[in-house]
Amino acid sequence: MFTVMSTNPAYFLREAGTSFKRNWVMSLGAIITIFLSLLLIGTSMMASKVINSLVTNVESKVSIQIFIKDDAATQDIEVLQRKLVTDSLVKSVNFTTKEQALENFKNTMSQSPEVVENLEGNPLPASLDIELKDARDVQTVVDTIKKSETFAKIADHPEDPEKSLKYGQQIVKKLFAFTRIVRIVGALFVVMLALVSLIFINNTIRLAIYSRRQEIAIMRLVGASNWFIRAPFMLEGIFQALIGAGLAIGGMLTIQFAAIPKLQSTISFMQFNLATSTTLGISGMLIILGCAIGAFGSWLAMRKYLKI
Amino acid sequence: MADINSIEETLDNIIPDVNRQAVPTAPPRSKGAPMILMRNVEKRYVAEKAALEGVNVEVSSGEFVFIVGHSGSGKSTFIRMLLREVLPTKGQIVVAGYDLANMRNSRVPYLRRNIGCVFQDFKLLPNKTAFENVAFALQVIGKSKHVINTQVPEVLGLVGLKDKINSYPNELSGGEQQRVSIARAFVNRPPMLLCDEPTGNLDPQTSLGIMKLLERINKTGTTVVIATHDREMVNNMRRRVIALDGGHVVRDQDRGVYGYVD
């Protein structure tokens, strides 16, 4: 006989759904904006992860080589090696003999064997190859080596020991400057995109509210609490954001499984691997970010109508 | 040579003052605790001009009061202040036990559950039936389905719309729409009904019916405050009249009349 009424939480869901249907064009706009923004945010997060792994890769290749003169005493070499191994900044120290050095050289030059054939004897020096725990400490370790007397004794160029050291200080500096810029630009990008989505959700909900301002006025008049009035609209905003986030995650996975393998096969010398945990983490972040944007955008849009 | 305009102006300035002094303080009422208490209330939207000034009003629980005055007399501000839509610049207002000046915004909905509101333009939702419009008021303050399904038909019966329960507002006459709106205001049994020009859009015959209905509601112990222009009605009812002019209470009279020449 009477319309069935319910006052349980289903009320909020129903109200949100009704409004969603009523303003579906605007809702669609909000969903697409959220979707594209979150997709870009997710992709840029993914890209920064890839760049990070590339940088780590390059960093691990930054090592210090000490070239040793041919007649250096094995004892001295061992003294220096032991000293370096105990240094807390050093990961490992490997001794490369003259023969190994020649072997390595031959391997790298396998494309042009005539160069190797023309060598008279073995012009390559033996070396100590030092790997660091953190590439940024390279200068400190180099300074320690330079101060060492043993080093001066065994260096390949006794008149100017520094020539016997080879390390990639400059490369490291440039690399860090570059990755810092990439990170800052990425962060700015994410903030801007989040702002755009926020504004769009805000507008959609504003429209939904406008079409129901009469209802809201009456709700306020009869003493509905602000949260009661706000809840359906916030739910609607979160609902839109969730759909957008879902689409964005789908898009991100497509990129990961379709685009990255292709990229990998083109640029084979670099590693683009993303752990599953990273993908899950980014997806989770997108959902949380989406919901936050949806809820906050709606809350912002409601403020004007709930001012007492 | 005295300018006639300036004389008129002077008179305008004097008369309200004279009136104010001539206001007989309302005799003590013994009906109950004050529903509305205003002490030295002042409201200025702009610094230079007071919309209300020096207003001292006490309305006891269970009273039936008319607020009369021209447009711009401060009547609207008076009503909106009781609902705490505007705050006083100065002074104290207590409504249904709530101290409006010192009240948190989040408590305002609970104040409003104590004041049923009726307006000139009914403010009904066009896409809801009479039942749904009344039920909406209970629904949004979190009343159960059971309460809604008992109280709504009961209150619609009280206002005489038992057989129009499933009609939409556009299927109802103006008087019937106002009855729905009164039902909505009263369904929660608030201690006070606040009516802003309830008969403003209705013909005299219908208006009389609405007034009788409000009187009946008043008999249940509900305080009824009506802001109105309807001289006929005020003169017929012979109830307490509070007259506002230029932001001041110029008359507060039991069994009063409209008393203005429009």
Image (tube, rainbow, N blue to C red):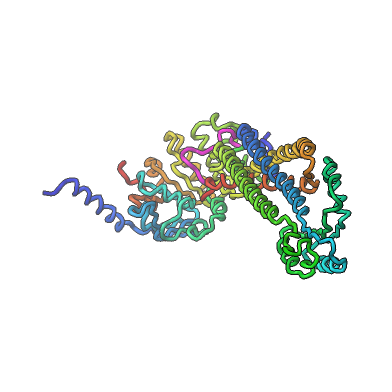
| Observer able to see residue A15 | no
Query: What residue is at 25 percent from the left and 50 percent from the top?
Result: B12
x and y, in percent, of residue A222 in the image: 56, 46
x and y, in percent, of residue A214 in the image: 54, 39
Query: What residue is at 54 percent from the left and 53 percent from the top?
Result: B108
In this image, A86 relative to B189: left or right? right
Quarter of the image that includes the N terminus of chain A = top right
In the image, residue B122 above or below residue B60: above
**In the orientation shown, which residue stands out farthest toward the left?**
B1
In this image, A281 relative to A101: left or right? left
In the image, residue B138 above or below residue B171: below
x and y, in percent, of residue A91 in the image: 81, 61
Front residue of B161/A272: it is A272
Query: What residue is at 77 percent from the left and 48 percent from the top?
Result: A278
**In the orientation shown, which residue stands out farthest toward the bottom?**
A149
Q: Which residues are magenta?
A: B117-131
Front residue of A306/A3: it is A306
Residue B71, by quadrant, is top left
